[in-house]
Amino acid sequence: MNTPAYTALTDTFTRLYRLGHLGALAGWDQAAMMPTKGNAARGAALAELQVVMHQILSDAALTGLLQAASTESLDALQQANLHEMRRDWTLSTLLPERLVQAQSLATSRCEHAWRNQRQNNNWPGFLDNFREVVSNAREEAQILSQAQGISPFDALMDKYEPGSRSADIDTLFDDVKTWLPDLVQQVLAKQASEPVLAPVGPFPVEQQRALGVDLMGLLGFDFEGGRLDVSAHPFCGGVPEDVRITTRYTEADFMRSMMGVVHETGHARYEQNLPADTRHLPVGRARSMGIHESQSLLFEMQLGRSAAFLQHIAPRIAQHLGHQAAFEADNLARLYTRVQPGLIRVDADELTYPAHVILRYEIERDLINGLMAPEDIPAQWDQKMAQYLGLDTRGNVKDGCLQDIHWPSGSFGYFPSYTLGAMYAAQFFACIRRAHPDLDTRVATGDLSPIFDWLQQHIWQQASRWPTQDLVQQATGEKLNPQHFRSHLEQRYL
């Protein structure tokens, strides 16, 4: 097939992918391995890389190639790839090189300083760097907003959730707020009379790591194409050929790191199983952050905290950490479904987690839309934390608005993806259950193939070939239906 323009575009985007590969691993190293004094130089290097990639993507020659390719005889996959290329090109050409460089430098500086500022509960120090991050994000949002005819916040959210709008998110979240508080109270009352044994530590880090690696193997992680390390905030990074996941440990509590590893392994399996022949092209990448989070939450919440899965791994936990009564399967199931409103999002139980997301979404939406100043965040945080979770965070920014890496790294518009992901995960798992009525029995024996096979066919190998809602429709027979999420929570906790 004669497609010279399309072929030239694939060459350009392959080059961008390779440069992005280096940037991803340099970013992972910055978060997990780099000594403190390396940050300024690393930040400058990453900013330079972002400028080079921006120059390639905004090259005037691509305008003609995109137009010419649209007239060539392309198959359906190539047309989908061209659509994603055009999307990337549009976002890039709208932003001035000056802003791209300024954003990279400011977020690198802010994120690196945040690591110590959080530990020291230092909001004024954080604010000094954060103001510039917000200013740059607002400038980007205004540019994209004017070009696309949407709100500034929607323009940033669209980078993570293509096609999503805050009006739709507001509708979803407002519905959750009508039933979630009562459900939490019902479950708290129910669990008050249910006995549960707390594991007795300490749990040495090396034993926790060995347990995590064991579970990664059970979950199908390819250790020849990735690794597990430690960072201040757990994440999944790298590239599909070399996926880097991290967790964090405390010897008093193995449960957080264990489920953190299960969560990040869900992200990693998605990346490792993107189609090998197109993963270097836009059509071969993960569809959206909501779909990405659906994979980690399907692994952690739908599968990882299920009674069947915990029944299977109970002997593995005892093998690595020593035998104690708390590691009996029934007790583990109670432990991992224990509901207790808490301050830290990444440690939150499945039921209260959406409240953490809604709180952050409402703050960042108003911040980017200019309805709130950076200085106002702690007060808004305190008010919403009291309203949604009944908790007092006054004077405690360490466990409040400084706890997440997203805002210091400039990732505004990302937070809705977590609860969207939980909703997608519930819908996917309901579909898998319908196809395999004996799923729990198979999971209890360690047979996870029905889950992996379904995800491989319907999600992983589809990558970005379809718009998100079309992907969900084809996989499950319906568009996003949040009732699956509510039904899952009611069935598990009541």
Image (tube, rainbow, N blue to C red):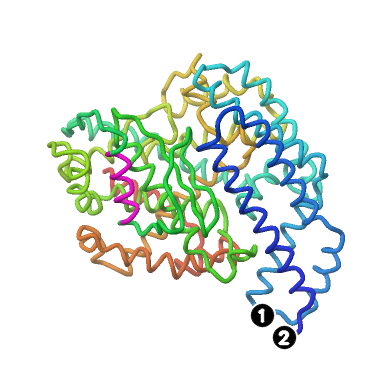
- Considering depth in this image, is 190 or 275 the residue closer to the camera? 275
| Residue 396 horizontal/vertical position (percent) | 49, 17
Please tell me how crowded label 2 is: few (under 14), some (14-19), or many (20+) other residues with Cα within 10 Å: few
Q: Residue at x 40, y 56 (%)?
A: 223
Judge from the rendering whether residue 246 lies leftward or rightward of residue 191; answer left or right: right
Instruction: Tell me the mark number nearer the camera, choosing from 2 and 1.
Output: 2
Structural crowding at the residue carrying mark 1, measured as other residues with C-alpha within 10 Å and reported as few (<14), some (14–19) or many (≥20):
few
Q: Amino acid at mark 1?
A: Asp
Question: Label 2, label 1: how many angstroms apart (C-alpha)?
Answer: 10 Å
Q: Disc 1 marks which residue?
A: 75
In which quarter of the view is residue 143 placed? top right
Label placed on residue 315: none
- Residue 373 on the magenta segment: no
Q: In the image, 288: left or right of 430?
A: right
In the rendered view, does 186 fall on the left or right side of 41?
Answer: left
* SS assignment for the magenta stretch, majority: helix
Type of amino acid under label 2: Met
Quarter that holds the N terminus: bottom right
Return the x and y of residue 3 as percentages of the image width and height: 76, 79
Q: Which range is magenta?
A: 207-217
> Are the residues flagged by discs 2 and 1 in contact, CB closer than 8 Å?
yes
Please tell me whether mark 1 sits on a helix, a strand or a loop.
Answer: loop
Q: Is residue 216 magenta?
A: yes
Find disc 2 in the rendering and name its residue.
1
Helix or strand or loop: what does disc 2 sit on? loop
* 388 vs 265: above or below: above
Residue 205 appears at what percent x and percent y?
31, 34
Q: Residue at 51% of width from left, 62% of height from top?
A: 479
Residue 405 vertical position relative to residue 469 in the rendered view, above or below: above
Which residue is pictured at 78% across the width and 56% down the height? 56
